[in-house]
Image (tube, grey):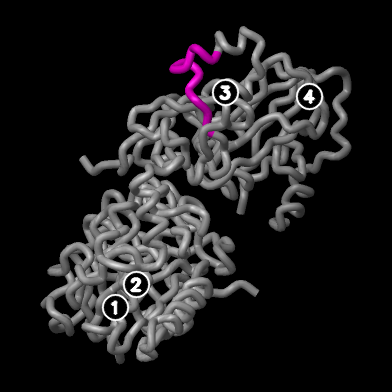
Amino acid sequence: MPKRTPLYQQHLALGARCIDFGGWEMPVQYTGIVAEHQAVRTAAGVFDISHMGEIWVGGAHASGFLNQTLTNDIGLLAVGESQYTLMCNEAGGVIDDLYVYRIANEAFLLMVNATRISADLHWLEYQASNHGEDRSVKVENQSEQTGAIAVQGSATPLFIGELFHGDGLISVKRPGDLVKNQVDAWNFGTGEVYVARTGYTGEEGFEIIAPNEQIVALWDAVLEIGRPHGIVPAGLGARDTLRLEMGYPLYGHELSEEISPIEAGLGYFVKVDKGKFVGRSALMKQKDERPKKKLVAFKMRDKSPPPRQGYEVYNNLEARKDLKSIASAGLKPQDTDPVIGTVTSGTQSPSLSCGIGMAQVHIDRAREGTAIDISIRGKRYPATVCKKPLYKKQ
Amino acid sequence: MSNIPDSLRYAKSHEWVRIEGDTATIGITDHAQAELTDVVFVELPETGRVLAVGDNCAVVESVKTASDLYAPVAGTVLEINAALADTPELANDSPFDEGWFFKLQIDGEPDTAHLLDAAGYAAEIGEA
């Protein structure tokens, strides 16, 4: 039996087509992926992200504990701020990528991937039990009782404030005053909800985290007040094309326990100078030694089928004419034309109208502008390694 | 409800076929295009290729997935719909007309016993 979010009936009523996503029955689209994508890029869209996990970490030494468990620097966060960060194992492999919100001085909300909740909990509890003599750190999984929606698009600051009355309970007055990565709480219905200026689309936008009982009312209210601004419900399909245009990683595609943040091009979020943390020595070594492979974004050069996860990457045949001469010397193609990488995610970009993707490639082929080939059903299509984001607002 | 023209024959794998003389025109059904969603690329067989019934002969790519197309009848590829290269969305907008995929030259009486009529296809997709 798949798990369903509190918004399942709303999705059905809106005509959603649902798919299995890590054991959750989630809307992949309502009217169409491309239309929903364009709505978010030009106006607004609302996503159900209630499947994501919410883990609270508190106690007198919560910040110290998290700083030793996560790669980014918790010390940079004031109360009411958040950051993107990674949780790594000792070898530097990624257990999860997540957002950590500092709600109070020693109370943190971790927003984690739906598919990683149990792995994260297991790791956090294991680390907490190892955290010196200190047993004061409390890890509490609130995922089952908590839902969330992402309200994304340039029009969203125009109407988000209509959802809530009164001042924020932490520091800002109105939700529209929140700056990037800032979070505050408002009363809604009978309880408190968190509103953060965060998202996974590259657009202006907000994520609202609330108890399950509040989620349906929030969703309905967002669709109602956003209607004059062109808001549409948007599914996981558009969520994926939007994040890929930005070059944002997705756990299970770009990240895994076998891939480090350094290899994934996320070194910025690994603060090796902050002191001891899990995975630090492995990650420092990688930073110094230059990893053998690197995650890159790429664009297909010509008309082609959309690239997809698992497709092989080769040197570009035209750019490497020497390959042909080596081939004519009677050497085996695999000796001279090795696989140099693998596509981790790919799609047809609705904004750019071409195939785009991310790939893990040999470090020597990772430079921007490098011509590569993507092998699709045995045929090679040229692509170019590009700077992230692949899509930039005009 | 999907559009299912009475004049066509259908394969369970969601291709339609229109037989006129010794030519068979093939495409994907309205139901198939709706299930696939936005078609962004169509890979068609080369003209001259000889196809047996059930041969994997084309690929339809939507934003989300790649789906194979199977030859509903046997024959030799006579012509492909070149318009699909630049406007693959024709498969969504006009699946039975401008969005046709390819034409086969059929040799003699085509074997269509395994194909469904409109009512049979409607039942197959649960729309009877």
Identify the amino acid type marked 2.
Answer: Gln
**Location of residue A27 in the rendering, given as x and y in whole percent from the top left corner:** 50, 63
Circles 4 and 1: CB atoms closer than 8 Å: no
Seen in the image, is A224 located left or right of residue A362?
Answer: left
Residue A55 vertical position relative to residue A158 in the rendered view, above or below: below
Q: Which residue is mark 4?
A: B51
Q: Which residue is mark 3?
A: A337
Mark 4 → mark 1, Cα distance in angstroms: 67 Å
Write the start and end of the magenta stretch as one range: A313-323
* Nearer mark to the viewer, of 3 and 4: 3
Q: Secondary structure at mark 3?
A: loop
Seen in the image, is B40 located left or right of residue B13?
Answer: left
**Location of residue B119 in the rendering, given as x and y in whole percent from the top left corner:** 76, 49
Circles 2 and 1: CB atoms closer than 8 Å: yes
Identify the amino acid type marked 4.
Answer: Leu
Circles 3 and 4: CB atoms closer than 8 Å: no
* Nearer mark to the viewer, of 1 and 3: 1
Mark 3 chain: A
Circles 2 and 4: CB atoms closer than 8 Å: no
* Nearer mark to the viewer, of 3 and 2: 2
Callout 4: 10 Å neighbours few (<14), some, many (20+)?
many
Split into 4 quadrants, where in the image is the C terminus of chain A? top left
Identify the amino acid type marked 1.
Answer: Gly
Are the numbered discs 4 and 1 placed on the same chain, yes or no?
no
Q: Report the residue at 45% width, 66% height from top.
A: A113
Looking at the image, which is closer to me, A11 or A69?
Answer: A69
Q: Which residue is mark 1?
A: A64
Mark 4 chain: B
